[in-house]
Image: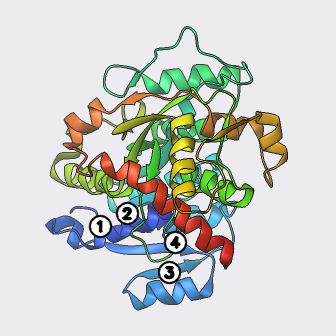
């Protein structure tokens, strides 16, 4: 019997909420029959999801590994779209799926949400400049897991540590794992709560607060970007392929899937915000200014130089050949929406500052 029970983490978040909405609207016969359990922290969120026919489970945080393991053991599929920086949580969810597999004898699948900062370099600090690394990573032709292992030996990074843990735990517990490694995601989320992404909104909020946009160092780092609708589509397509014939879908070490569409430099992104903010009369300047990494970290609550450099200044260029070939993923949102998104983020940042 095909898996029917899904445990989703991050349902109130930007990615998780959008994925859940996509799956609930799916016309695929197997996906239409799925039932959902969602982990939430607030009683009002629990009441909302309960009213939508889902089973909410209140929890405090992802350190509750016993709870995570227990909940996963009662489900056939886990979609982890909460923090990608919590390896112990990911391991607990996979271990729980292994117990489910022993009890039912049926298939179980673990789908993990990660990001391409895991393969980004560190060009500002020069801690890792990657002269010997490929300029563009390819999820079909390259062993991304092996590369992440190599990077971990050089310098630990929680998200990358989590990627490695997912693969290793999947092998240890005989649970197929699939990592969807996303670039900069933009666009308004389709979930019921958090509608905004992380990177561009962060830069937009800083710009509105300071009166001008910024980029780290020289802003030469290149990243991919993709609309949230195309991102959520990847999850639906992955499930469709798994239901059809899971044996044809690479998992584990070869089951790391990229999802980029267009490309930008970080300076271009900040300049896009600068022009949009100036045109709207919100910013004083139509040009973006450089800021030092240490200065930005000091000026950011909880700022960590490693995270800021990897997420806002690095080079992380990927090719989603595996996603396209295996999942049949073809981005549908036009590249023009990326440019339009700057004005949307400035507007959202202004509204946020007024609340």
- Tell me which numbered mark, 3 or 2, is placed earlier along the sequence: 2
Q: Tell me the CA gap for discs 2 and 1.
A: 6 Å
Judging by the rendered image, the residue that carries numbered circle 1 is 23
- Which is more toward the observer, 346 or 249? 346
Callout 1: 10 Å neighbours few (<14), some, many (20+)?
many
The N terminus: image quadrant: bottom left
Q: Position of residue 94 (x, y in %)?
A: 50, 51
Judging by the rendered image, the residue that carries numbered circle 4 is 12
Residue plotted at (34% across, 57% down): 232
Judging by the rendered image, the residue that carries numbered circle 2 is 19
Is residue 255 among what the camera can see?
yes
Q: How is the image coloured?
A: rainbow
Q: Tell me the CA gap for discs 3 and 1.
A: 17 Å
Q: Tell me the CA gap for discs 3 and 4.
A: 11 Å
Residue plotted at (67% across, 79% down): 355
Callout 2: 10 Å neighbours few (<14), some, many (20+)?
many
Q: Position of residue 23 (x, y in %)?
A: 29, 67
- Tell me which numbered mark, 2 or 4, is placed earlier along the sequence: 4
**Left or right of residue 61, residue 97 in this image:** left
Occupied quadrant, residue 52? bottom left
Residues tagged 2 and 1 counted as in contact (Cβ below 8 A): yes
* 294 to 176, vertically: above or below: above
Which one is in front in this view, the residue at disc 3 or the one at disc 4?
A: 4
- Tell me which numbered mark, 3 or 1, is placed earlier along the sequence: 1
Q: Secondary structure at mark 1?
A: helix
Callout 4: 10 Å neighbours few (<14), some, many (20+)?
many
């Amino acid at each position: 019997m095909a898996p029917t029970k899904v445990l989703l983490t991050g349902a109130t978040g930007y990615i998780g909420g959008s994925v859940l909405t996509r799956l609930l609207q799916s016309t695929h016969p197997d996906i239409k029959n799925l039932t959902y359990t969602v982990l939430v922290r607030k009683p009002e969120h629990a009441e909302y999801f309960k009213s939508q026919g889902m089973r909410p489970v209140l929890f405090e945080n992802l350190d509750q590994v016993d709870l995570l393991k227990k909940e996963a053991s009662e489900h056939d599929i886990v979609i982890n779209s909460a923090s990608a920086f919590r390896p112990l949580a990911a391991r607990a969810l996979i271990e729980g799926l292994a117990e489910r597999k022993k009890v039912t004898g049926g298939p179980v699948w673990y789908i993990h949400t990660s990001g391409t900062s895991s393969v980004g370099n560190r060009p500002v600090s020069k801690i890792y400049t990657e002269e010997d690394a490929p300029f563009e990573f390819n999820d079909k032709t390259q062993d991304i897991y092996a590369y992440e292992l190599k990077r971990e030996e050089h310098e630990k990074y929680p998200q990358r540590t989590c990627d490695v843990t997912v693969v290793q735990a999947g092998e240890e517990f005989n649970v197929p794992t699939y990592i969807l490694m996303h670039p900069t995601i933009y666009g308004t989320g389709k979930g019921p709560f958090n509608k905004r992404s992380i990177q561009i909104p962060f830069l937009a909020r800083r710009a509105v607060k300071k009166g001008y946009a910024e980029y780290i160092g020289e802003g030469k780092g290149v990243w991919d970007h993709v609309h949230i609708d195309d991102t959520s589509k990847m999850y639906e397509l992955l499930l469709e392929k798994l239901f059809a014939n899971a044996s044809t879908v690479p998992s584990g070490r070869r089951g790391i899937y990229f999802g980029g569409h267009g490309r930008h430099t970080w300076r271009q992104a900040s300049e896009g915000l600068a022009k949009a903010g100036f045109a709207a009369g919100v910013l004083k300047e139509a040009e973006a200014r450089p800021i030092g990494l240490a200065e930005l970290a000091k000026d950011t609550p909880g700022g960590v130089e490693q995270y800021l450099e990897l997420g806002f200044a690095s080079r992380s260029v990927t090719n989603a050949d595996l996603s396209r070939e295996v999942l049949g993923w073809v981005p549908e949102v036009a590249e023009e929406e990326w440019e339009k998104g700057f004005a949307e983020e400035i507007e959202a940042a202004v509204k946020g500052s007024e609340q």
